[in-house]
Image (tube, rainbow, N blue to C red):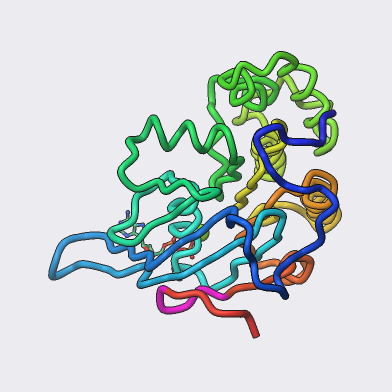
Amino acid sequence: MLLSNEHSPINVNQPSTHHHTITATPAILATNLCKSVGEEPNKISILSELQLKVAAGESVAIVGSSGSGKSTLLGLLAGLDQPSSGSVSVKGAAFSGLDEDARAAIRGKNMGFVFQSFQLLPTMTALENVMLPMQLANQANAKQVALATLEKVGLSARVSHYPKQLSGGEQQRVAIARAFASQPAILFADEPTGNLDLATGERIIELLFDLNHAAGTTLILVTHDMKLAKRCQRSLTLNNGQLSESL
Ligand SMILES: Nc1ncnc2c1ncn2[C@@H]1O[C@H](COP(=O)(O)OP(=O)(O)O)[C@@H](O)[C@H]1O
Ligand SMILES: [Mg+2]
């Protein structure tokens, strides 16, 4: 399997830069990010003037209590949702002003996303779900890569199963395989070990950090798993709509 990413300017051998001033274009830059939902008088502010800079190749954990806005933040960083105000840039290119098709193109080229609720397509098998993003990107060896990735997450015996025939943990691993099969430059995962037993969770964590180390994949992980958060170079806590370094 290819470990380089042709779209990514990442230097594979470059160590973390988070203790230094980051001069290269960040993988992700969020500036004054605000998100509210609903109308007055029931308006809820979820994110409020949030700032985040993630360097290419960095691994960042986002922790915080349930309802603090972690999933909302991840959706905004990946351009799946639009902020009320403020901006998000991916490798220097801002999402603002782009329509859904243009945002989807940036995502398809740069990002993998593991949803908290998996969001597998129910009419497709595990294999077809994993192949789909690669097919949409006209990747030639989609089936081979999908099979190899499903093997890595321990699902070789489940490739022809449909999501409803799979356990929660198995669906989560299909979603993980789908997100990283194409070796995205930036991988977002929303509680990627939330439905896994300890041993399977550890295996998935190893896979995520293998990608980070070998291919320089930027990892942005929402997690309640302190072991996973500690593996990341930085751990940030979301509280009152803003991020701060975890204690
Ligand atoms: N579209 C929406 N409409 C109304 N409330 C929402 C919407 N999306 C999220 N929320 C609320 O915003 C808060 C943050 O949600 P979420 O980002 O899912 O939190 P977390 O992932 O940290 O548990 C929650 O109180 C949730 O109910
Ligand atoms: Mg969530």
Does residue 211 sit above or below 107 in this rendering? below
Q: Position of residue 71 (x, y in %)?
A: 49, 57
- Towards the viewer: 112 or 4: 4
- Range covered by the magenta-colored residues: 237-241
Q: Quadrant of residue 64?
A: bottom right
Question: Can I make out residue 207 in this image?
Answer: no
Magenta-highlighted stretch: main secondary structure?
strand
Which quadrant, please, contains the N terminus? top right
Does residue 62 sit above or below 170 in this rendering? below
Residue 83 included in the magenta stretch of the image:
no
Q: So how many labels did they put on this image?
A: 0
Question: Can I make out residue 187 in this image?
Answer: yes
Task: Name the residue: 83% across, 56% down.
Answer: 202
- Towards the viewer: 78 or 67: 78
Q: Quadrant of residue 171?
A: top right
Task: Name the residue: 67% across, 52% down.
Answer: 192
Q: Position of residue 147 (x, y in %)?
A: 79, 23
- Towards the viewer: 1 or 57: 57
Task: Name the residue: 64% across, 66% down.
Answer: 22
Of all residues, the one furthest to the front in this rendering is 23
Q: Position of residue 36 (x, y in %)?
A: 28, 63
Is 96 placed left or right of 132 in the picture?
left
